[in-house]
Image (tube, rainbow, N blue to C red):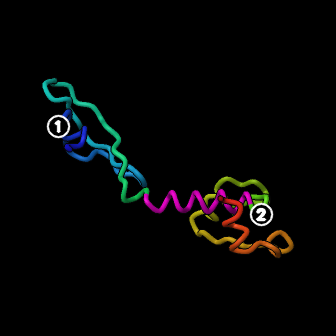
Amino acid sequence: MADVSERCYDMGRVVGDGNFAVVRECRVRGLAETFAMKIVDNAKLQGLDVWAMGVILFVLLGGFPPFRSPDRNQEELFRLIQKGEVHFLSPYWDNVSEGEILNSSI
């Protein structure tokens, strides 16, 4: 089965590239007007689902988010997320096991 974009659109040059999508110049077949279309890059998104699930599990089990800026500084928060450095603080994580994770998700 052909992709919708292959059947309905003529895809042109890339006009922008982001973390999870590419913006391409497009034209609907049969029409002269061009427009920009954001196309999600599935290869870039595969790891994102697992990361999001990990963040959700962290909050459910620990009771607070894995990335926090003490002074609520947005830029610092983004740096912490990009570094991916997570600390399992005592006493919040002392009694959490792999079994707890599975039991909480089933």
Residue drawn at the location 22% of the way across and 30% of the way down = 34
Which SS type dominates the magenta stretch? helix
Instruction: Give the image location of residue 78, x and y in percent.
Output: 61, 58
Q: Is residue 92 above or below residue 31?
A: below
Per the model, the C-alpha gap separating discs 1 and 2 is 49 Å
Q: Is residue 48 above or below residue 10?
A: below
Residue type at mark 1 is: Asp
**Of residues 63 and 87, which is closer to you in this image?**
63
Residue drawn at the location 59% of the way across and 58% of the way down = 53
- Mark 1 or 2: the one toward you: 2
Instruction: Give the image location of residue 11, x and y in percent.
Output: 20, 41
Please indicate whether residue 59 sits to the left or right of residue 13 in the image: right
Q: Could you tell me which quadrant the C terminus lies in?
A: bottom right
Please indicate whether residue 11 sits to the left or right of residue 97 in the image: left
Residue type at mark 2 is: Gly
Instruction: Give the image location of residue 63, x and y in percent.
Output: 79, 58
Instruction: Give the image location of residue 97, x and y in percent.
Output: 73, 74
Q: Is residue 27 above or below residue 48?
A: above
**Of residues 87 and 1, which is closer to you in this image?**
1
Please indicate whether residue 33 sits to the left or right of residue 104 in the image: left
Label 2 secondary element? helix
Q: Could you tell me which quadrant the N terminus lies in?
A: top left
Label 1 secondary element? strand
Which residue corresponds to mark 1?
10
Q: Quadrant of residue 94?
A: bottom right
Q: Quadrant of residue 12?
A: top left
- What is the residue that sits farthest to the left in this orientation? 30
Residue range in magenta is: 46-60
- What is the residue that sits farthest to the right in this orientation? 91
Total of numbered circles in the picture?
2
Which residue corresponds to mark 2?
62
